[in-house]
Amino acid sequence: MEPPFRVVGISHKTAPIGVRECVAVSGPRLRALLEALREEADEAVAVSTCNRTELYLVRPQRDPLEIYRDHLGHYTQYAYAHAGVRALRHLFEVAAGLDSLVVGEAQILGQVREGLFAARKAGTTGPISEQAFQTAIAAGKRARAETAIGRGAVSVAYAAVDLARSIFGDLSGLRALVLGAGEMAELVLEHLAHFGIGEVWVLNRTIENAEKLARLYGGRACGMEHVGEALAHADIVIASAAAPHYVVREARVREVLAQRDGPLFLIDIALPRNIDPAVGRLGGAYLYNLDDLEAVVAENRAAREGELPRVRRIVDEEISGWLEWYAGHRAAPRIQRLRAWIERTIRDELENVLGGRGLAGSEALERTIRRMAGKAAHPLIQIAKDPELGPALERLLEG
């Protein structure tokens, strides 16, 4: 029997960035979504990143596509839905980095873990989703430890900096503006520094976080209110701030361009986007977003092509292990009844032999009965787990 595990989602493979940013959830919106999903399924976990927003559901009350539409918007023409082992495989491949825009990226493993933690905090996980996500995370860790899928600089941040290098060739002496101070921004700064970038500005809503990153990379930190001044000094802008609205607007960029001679290159790797798409229509402004990184990451994908079969074997092994756990999970009540039946049978036989003497109140004898029942039940447990033989065994026990 297929496990009652479902996934429904939208990703970079099925939808453009304009759709993906509409369904992205975080913070209060994520908490509200998980709260609503309590009424939709026995268990629920949401995974939302810059390239995907997925719902993992156990025993949903209705069609998962309808659930997705009603809670995240009418974008189901871009959605995919998988059930049972196929849904499980999808989760494991996501955690292993096989389904990422940048194949093998390490950030996705943390994002899958964050999705589990958020659902756990909301009280929407249960035994099936917990075991599925824990095993998926284990598969992702094994993929990175046992193969070269994540070797080298593998991230959206690296792809963004690589795109800047393809535009400018040499980054030394150029001035960069990084919007945001989270993990992605830190990776961007690390790669910019590696390729010899000149001056760096870090802008963030929380100035303390910007100052921390700026100190690490010898840059200047400012609050978001200084975006106009920072734009005027920048050759390259890489945006990765967690903001619910555009941080860089068309009017501000138009003002900056009117006062400078050279072009301005902007790479927006945030979701929702940080830079107004209208900026790309301005003369002298060259705007790229996550979807434009496809050509850059094609080379990355080709370089790791040889590792994919090895990662898929790991995924297969972890799926087999999960299915074995699930068989035991489903059969647990049956196994308990089997042990209880064997204990009763042994006790009845002893009663007959001893004529009712010596059984009552003897803890040592009770321990012996339980130990004997456990040994006797052991060879029958695999039968109890079997989807065809298990029900027949249960009928025998009931008889």
Image (cartoon, rainbow, N blue to C red):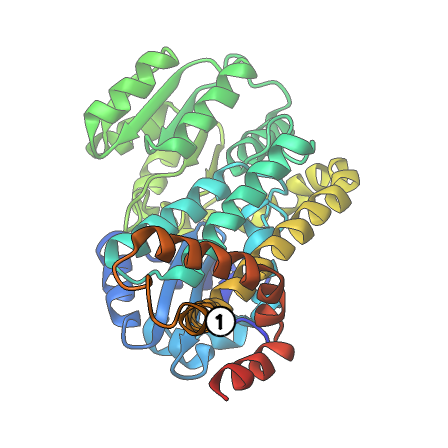
**Residue 110 or residue 254, whichever sits in front:** 110
- Left or right of 194 on screen, residue 296: right
Q: Would you call the spot at circle 1 few (<14 residues within 10 Å), some (14-19), or many (20 or more)? A: many
Picture coordinates of residue 399, whole percent (x, y) = 50, 89
Q: Which residue is mark 1?
A: 338
Look at label 1 and name its amino acid: Leu
x 60%, y 27%: residue: 153
x 33%, y 73%: residue: 71
Q: What is the number of callouts on the image?
A: 1
**Residue 273 or residue 83, whichever sits in front:** 83
Against 147, residue 122 (above or below) is: below
- Left or right of 51 on screen, residue 253: left
Report the residue that reaches farthest toward the right. 306
Occupied quadrant, residue 224:
top left
Picture coordinates of residue 62, whole percent (x, y) = 41, 84
- Left or right of 324 on screen, residue 269: left
Q: Is residue 269 visible?
A: yes
x 74%, y 42%: residue: 310
Q: Secondary structure at mark 1?
A: helix
Screen quadrant of the N terminus = bottom right
**Residue 240 or residue 172, whichever sits in front:** 240
Picture coordinates of residue 349, whole percent (x, y) = 47, 72
Occupied quadrant, residue 162:
top right
Picture coordinates of residue 59, whole percent (x, y) = 42, 76
Q: Is residue 235 visible?
A: no
Report the residue that reaches farthest toward the bottom. 399
**Residue 284 or residue 244, whichever sits in front:** 244
x 50%, y 81%: residue: 397
Occupied quadrant, residue 19:
bottom left
